[in-house]
Image (cartoon, rainbow, N blue to C red):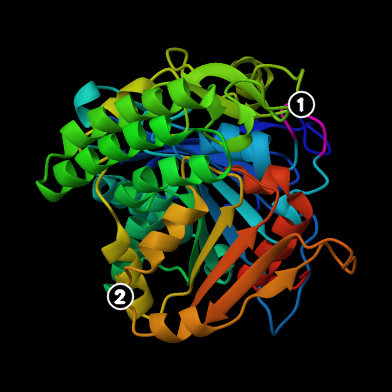
Amino acid sequence: MKMVTTKGIIVLCVLCFVSSVSSIVNTSGGTADGSQAWGYTEVRHGAHLFWWLYKSPYRVEDPSKPWPTILWLQGGPGGSGVGFGNFGEIGPLDVNLKPRNSTWLKMADLLFVDSPVGTGFSYVEDDKLFVKTDVESATDLTTLLKAIYNVNTTLQKSPLYIFAESYGGKFAVTLGLSVLQAIKDGQLKLQLGGVALGDSWISPEDFVLSWGPLLKDVSRIDEVGLNKSNSLALKIKQQLADGQYQAATDSWFDLEGVILDNSGNVDFYNFMSDDGNSPVVAKTKASRHLGKKPYAIISEANGPDLGSVMNGPIREKLKIIPANVTWGGQSDGVFSALESDFMKPRIAEVDELLSKGMNVTVYNGQLDVICATKGTEAWINKLKWDGLETYLKLSRSPLYCGKDESATKGFYRSYRNFAFYWILGAGHFVPVEQPCVSLQMVGSIVNSPNA
């Protein structure tokens, strides 16, 4: 893999961008020009998180607007941010290792982490070390951030924004609270700018209840399919009310089957497509977005398999991946360990972030099914945040691509420290399906000097 140049890879030290780190970081590497750094952090004995940090070539020095850093958290659980988010969505190169014009580096530095441990290039030495809850994952990530930030005064001056996609949203809100506590306790030298939740699995109950009505409204299922879907969704709601989280996960998987059987195999990422036939996704053998089916990777329609890229040229570039570690090799174990936490909601954590004054942004693709806008709006309406009533009464503002107002690309509404973006024409993977308006949105969220 190459960014602009791939020369001068240096192993076992991180140059310029990340200064010498504490003993908790075992191995690290980076490019000779300091534009990239990567490494392993042993967050617990035998549990190793892999991270990759990019310094933006578009950086602008503005005393009134410090240059931000975005931490990207992928879904799954078991989806690789270093792979999917980086090469599939927002990093400097796409899956074909060609430059991406819409990279979010235009607005911020980017930090990708394969989290939880066992995801992507991250690994555990014993299966007992997989995390079993979102909170445990947040604790590991906070340990990683301490190792990276506490020794780097440059990064400490850059506000960090946690961006998440899909199940990553549950990790993001628990991490946000963990980071705030660590900062308060004087254990973490970091400025937290905000949390952004993209098509995020915050309230599983509201999402499963939304699937049938949404797909009926857009003619993907009929009354028979709607009744079957609603019946199983209500069963899940009761299981969640009874605290039967493992049973709810099993029923969720059954509900996906009912939806596929009655919709002509609708694509859970985009109801305008059939499963496996989307023009912007290619299948791999890794874990899917939220579970046990093949994960859809954004790439060119006839592009290479991401697994081959990650275990081939990327592995060769990084140099530090242990011989017995394969990208995505432990992802199934990550999901299995979290099955009992999978269906638990994290609405209360969003409320707590808002009550602490943290900026929270939600954005959703219009065509998504798995984390449908209908479900997202439902859980937002359950917030106990004292600004909700006023927020809901405000009118939305249209969004466009640049100065071209001939086509509406989305809508936006905000009040105090909460904001919502409705992105039209996009499914689950908003940055890929609507790159122009997404980049503008990101610039606004992180208050980038380039926005």
Residue matched to label 1: 300
Q: Tag 2, which secondary structure? A: helix
The residue that mark 2 highlights is: 184
87 vs 247, nearest the viewer: 247
Q: Secondary structure at mark 1?
A: loop
Q: Which disc number belongs to residue 150?
A: none
- Which residue is found at the position 45% from the left and 40% from the top? 75
Residue 200, visible in the rendered structure: yes
Q: Residue furthest front?
A: 223
Give the distance between the C-alpha atoms of the residues marked 2 and 1, in whole angstroms. Answer: 45 Å
Q: Amino acid at mark 2?
A: Lys
Report if residue 212 lies within the magenta region. no
Q: Is residue 267 left or right of residue 105?
A: left
In this rendering, is residue 241 above or below 389?
above
Span of residues in magenta: 94-99
Residue closest to the eye, 235 or 17: 235
- Going 37% across and 59% down the picture, which residue do you hit? 173
Q: Is 185 positioned to the left or the right of 367 in the image?
A: left
x then y, percent, for residue 331: 39, 24
Q: Residue at x 38, y 25 (%)?
A: 258
**Whether residue 134 is situated above or below residue 322 in the rendered picture:** below
